[in-house]
Amino acid sequence: MKELSKALLVSLWFMFLTFPILVIRVNTVENTVEWRWRNMLMVGAAAFALHIVWGRMLARGQRRQTGAGRKTPGGIAPGHRLSRFRRFGPAGILLLTAGLAALPFFSSLYQVNILITAMIYIMLGLGLNIVVGLAGLLNLGYVAFYAVGAYSYALLHLHYGLNFWLALPLGASLAALAGIALGYPVLRLRGDYLAIVTLAFGEIIRLVLENWSGFSFGPSGIADIPRPPLFGISMSLEASTVFFYFLMLLMVTLTVFVVTRLQHSRIGRAWVALREDEIACQAMGIDTTRIKLAAFALGATWAGLGGVLFASRTTFINPACFTIWESMLILCIVVLGGMGSIIGVVVGALFLILLPEYLRAFSEYRVLLFGLLLVLMMIFRPGGLLPDRRRTYHFKGETG
């Protein structure tokens, strides 16, 4: 009854607030006023129904959160249902590998290009996951390192004739240096202050690229960036795209392997400790300066690799490719998939990159839908679609 009265009050407020806009229509040509009472009733009914549904969903989400630690009758905790598929591990990986390897030969060039884009974002998401998901350092200027990698390849090829294979490690190294350059001055910052500084860093890099025409060719950008060569063999556009697809598969596999090893290494556990409680982390004797700089450098390294791959794929870059919205998109991938979760970031990247391509009819509402999606995720699944599984340790002391 209390819920119904609250929903009724909310619907009355909505009717009152929207009354001048949705009910009254003034015709200045005929000097008449039209009263649209039907609109008011529809607004009231919709607000009433939405409030009831919203309340039910919130209550359900809270019940799930409070019961997250309990096990279901099947013996599997609610957040760990993915472990059911572990028994299919080797066979599943084999089938997935065979499917991905055969995909370019059975699908169109358009589909292959979309998958290449998704794989670039998987790399970027996993790189940002090191900084945000594992170390807990909110970085809103991640696109700056992406731009450093892309412009490194474009400028090194333009001025010194370096090919893709030489520019790939150089672009990653320059991005890592940029990560250290950003990380060192912000060692003492955390939370909102760190987010603001990194956001400013991303915008500074974009503005420098846009206004320093003698260095970066300004808004005109750099064109004719070569695609990755294969032993000097001349390839058609289709063959080059298929080759790039397999290159991206290799790079994503390498990224997943390295990030997994990092996550379960000594430095990975130090990042998690830093994320949970920095003061306790320092009290345990962990050098927070070193692990913060390592997180920034390694995260930026994957962004630099992604930038070089992006420049070689599109063959053209300009500052408009590296706006703040790219940072937001990569952050959305990490938050949606699950901060700290590798499989979650992969799923989040596929979801956010592939879905808009297949739902182009709603492209105008993309930003609105992203915002709505994040709000819903924060309310009902704050850990993401596939949250990271926290390791538990059991101490068995001597009895008696």
Image (cartoon, rainbow, N blue to C red):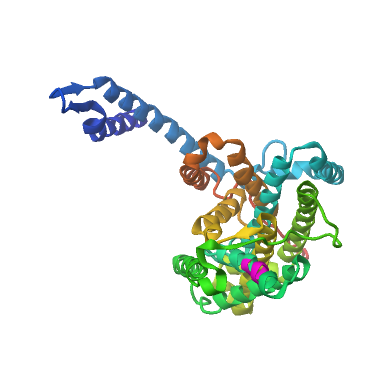
Q: Quadrant of the N terminus?
A: top left
Residue placed furthest toward the left: 31
Residue 166: x, y in percent?
A: 76, 71
Tell me the quarter of the picture where residue 250 sits.
bottom right
- Give me the residue at 80% from left, 48% from top: 239
282 sits left or right of 2 in the view:
right
Q: 145 or 397: which is nearer to us?
A: 145
Is residue 301 highlighted in magenta? no
What secondary structure predominates along the stretch shown in magenta? helix
Looking at the image, the residue that sits furthest to the top is: 38
In the image, taking residue 42 as reference, residue 238 lies left or right, namely right
* Foreground of the two, 313 or 142: 313
Quadrant housing the C terminus: bottom right
- The percent coordinates of residue 100 (x first, y second) are 80, 44
Question: Would residue 356 be found to the left or right of residue 170 on screen?
Answer: left
Q: Nearer the viewer, residue 247 or 390?
A: 247
Q: Which residues are magenta?
A: 151-155
* Up/down of 278 relative to 34, above or below: below
